[in-house]
Image (tube, helix red, strand yellow):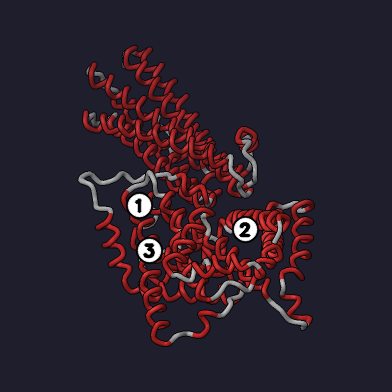
Amino acid sequence: MDLFDVLTMIGGLSLFLFGMNLMGSYLEKAAGSSLKMLLSKLTTRKLMGFLTGMGVTAIIQSSSATTVMVVGFVNSGLLSLKQAINVIMGANVGTTVTAWILSLTGLESGDFFVQLLKPTSFTPVLALIGIVLTMTGKSERKKDIGMILLGFAVLMFGMDTMSDAVSGLKEVPEFRNILVMFSNPILGVIAGAALTGIIQSSSASVGILQALSATGQVTFGAAIPIIMGQNIGTTVTALLSSVGTNKNAHRTAVVHLLFNVIGTVVWLIVFYALNAVFRFAFVALPIDQLGIAIVHTVFNLLCTVLLFPFTGLLEKLACRIIPDAKAPDQIQILDERLMATPAVAISRCMEVTGSMARISMDAMKTACGVLKHYDAKTAQAIRETEDDVDQYEDMLGTYLVKLSGMDLSLSDSRQTAKMLHLISDFERISDHAVNVLESAEEMENKGLEFSEYARKELDVLVSAVGEIMDLALESFLKNDVGLASMVEPLEEVVEALKEQLRTRHILRLQKGECTIELGFVWSDLLTSLERVADHCSNIAGCIIEMSHDSLDVHDYLGSVKTGSPGFLQAYDAYARKYALVE
């Protein structure tokens, strides 16, 4: 093996790692909705969690990515530690799929159909399809599929290049001597763990071992401890990801480490104990790509069989290693680790935005209640709620801006834009809740009181605003265009009510039935309530326009006000419902 072979091997390794990363990234992107569906089915049932972890890992071709995702879910409160353990076990089995795909490079036969199964036969075709889809595909999905195919082609080409480059090592006695060292189980485990920890991918390190097996110098005795060590090395990614997380997220990463360390120690002892008794002949035989895939799969299945009944004990052990502090951790509402899977991060943002919306709307309704019965504790709670909503806006805005800068699918990009558009409206509603509260406080401090007629009129407006908030909130939470379409007619009624109440107040002033001081409070209240209705109109308009792949809310509002039959009918119904008593 000369210098040029070494350079070829480095180039092949680089292409292999790049192809694996490229394919995994685009598989994850394309499977975003599938991941959300799989994760939504997670229950406390152990088998369901196991199958989910296995399925997600098989889809995105990376147990490291799955475990990092799980750490993020636990940190955000989306998963419990008990659920996470089952998912991690499934991920360890799911990652064996890659080794089976890579083992196809070792197929040797003169049969035409067997030759077709070799990657060198079909990879060029996949590369051609991939480049055509990437360069000419009009839809984002077609381009993503093209990149997946290209990533797979690059991966396989790199694997083939590596295998060819290292084939000359079979004539090098020093290489064989190095591999004989790894027949020592301790050294083999350390070597496998170190390699995987450096490149942070057990699938990639198994692929490298499969490429080295093309030399014919890698024996079962050397490969088995290396494969076991690779499972330990893959936990490095999750451990690094858990830095800065809460206790349960730390424990999740520790469980991943414990699972692989315990499995490795137990089965290493069992295997070498049996070998000492029965002297397995295959230990000294050379292993090929298929043999490595089989050993990798059998080992991961045996680890799962061993520890699957003891998930409760693993949980207790992790809690013992990382005990609870005196003060419980604060769950992070949004975790940047979830950005590794944008579809899941967006789903989480929708939940958090929904919480923000409910809090904001409730604050406004509570503030309207304070107008009738002022209470200092309630007033303080409204102000604290407004501070919370401000924090929600800052947190969501920062998170969504970062998320929008990532490589998102078209639907995910639209969802991100919609939330960025809406959070300011929800925040402004909470601001108006404080404005209404300040009007109530002014009346309380100055001993002011509206007349009976004014109170009844205000009740009508408050009821209309309460209904428009309910419509806007429900239409957002359910993404219901039908409910959203009912908001704008009611907003027009609210605006008309405001003008009527303003006119009636002027008449009372002229008759001496109201004071100038009360008039200022009255005007402030009408303005705040009408602006809340305006923000609800913006929310509904955004939901409707997003359903048409647009964000031109002003154009939408202009079009519906021109007099569509549905709009006029709804407007008449609301006008009758909230008609003022003469």
Q: Nearer the viewer, mark 2 or mark 3?
A: 2
Q: For mark 3, does the 10 Å Cα neighbourhood hold few (<14), some (14 to 19), or many (20 or more) residues?
A: many
Check whether the beta carbons of the residues at disc 2 and disc 1 lie within 8 A of each other.
Answer: no
Q: Secondary structure at mark 1?
A: helix
Q: What residue is shown at x 56% (from left), y 45% (from top)?
A: 415
Please tell me whether mark 3 sits on a helix, a strand or a loop.
helix
What amino acid is at disc 1? His
Which residue, given by chain and number where applicable, does mark 2 sit on?
20
Q: Which residue is mark 3?
A: 85
Reading the chain from its start, which is encountered first: label 2 or label 3?
2
Q: Quadrant of residue 67?
A: bottom left
Residue farthest front in this picture: 173
Residue type, numbered disc 3: Ile
Relative vertical location of residue 18 with respect to residue 99 in this rendering, above or below: above
- First in sequence: mark 2 vs mark 1: 2
Look at the image and tell me whether residue 575 can be seen. Answer: no
In the picture, the disc for residue 250 is: 1
Q: Secondary structure at mark 2?
A: helix
